[in-house]
Amino acid sequence: MQQKTDGRVVRLFTKYVSAEGRSIEQWFLVAIGEDDKATDAVAKSANAADAVFEVVGHIPAATLANWGMTEGEVRLVLPGEPISGWEPVVSASLGD
């Protein structure tokens, strides 16, 4: 099946997780072409309703197909896992 929809790269920040006041950052690849639906899908799959979500990039449909992702799929990016083939959103602050 050929992927027809572009995807999104979504960054999630949890609120403070301990008395130390640290937050957790996670990145997700989402095979959904709309920002709001992509962040909703991440919130649901990560069970993180109180988190902050930011769409930081777009993934072309051909790249999603090469990765074997299908429409609606959400995948966690593991720490240190290289992801290439996506285009950063200009307004996003990547890696301060």
Image (cartoon, helix red, strand yellow):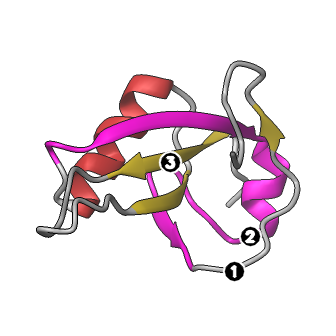
Closer to us: mark 1 or mark 2? 1
Q: Is residue 59 magenta?
A: yes
Label 3, secondary structure: give it: strand
Residue 15's x, y, as percent?
22, 50
Q: Which three-letter amino acid code belongs to the residue tagged 2?
A: Trp
Return the mark for residue 11. Answer: 3
Q: Is residue 95 visible?
A: yes
C-alpha distance separating marks 1 and 2 = 17 Å
- Between residue 93 and residue 34, name the one nearer to us: 93
Q: Is residue 61 magenta?
A: yes
Residue appearing at x 41%, y 49% in the figure: 12
- Image quadrant holding the C terminus, namely top right
Mark 2 neighbour density, 10 Å: few (under 14) some (14–19) many (20 or more): few
Return the mark for residue 80. Answer: 1
Q: Which three-letter amino acid code belongs to the residue tagged 3?
A: Arg
Label 1, secondary structure: give it: loop
Eyeballing the image, is 68 above or below 25? below
| Residue at the top extreme, as displayed | 91
Mark 1 neighbour density, 10 Å: few (under 14) some (14–19) many (20 or more): few
> Which residue is labeled 2 in the image?
67
Eyeballing the image, is 4 above or below 63? above
Which stretch did the figure color magenta? 49-78
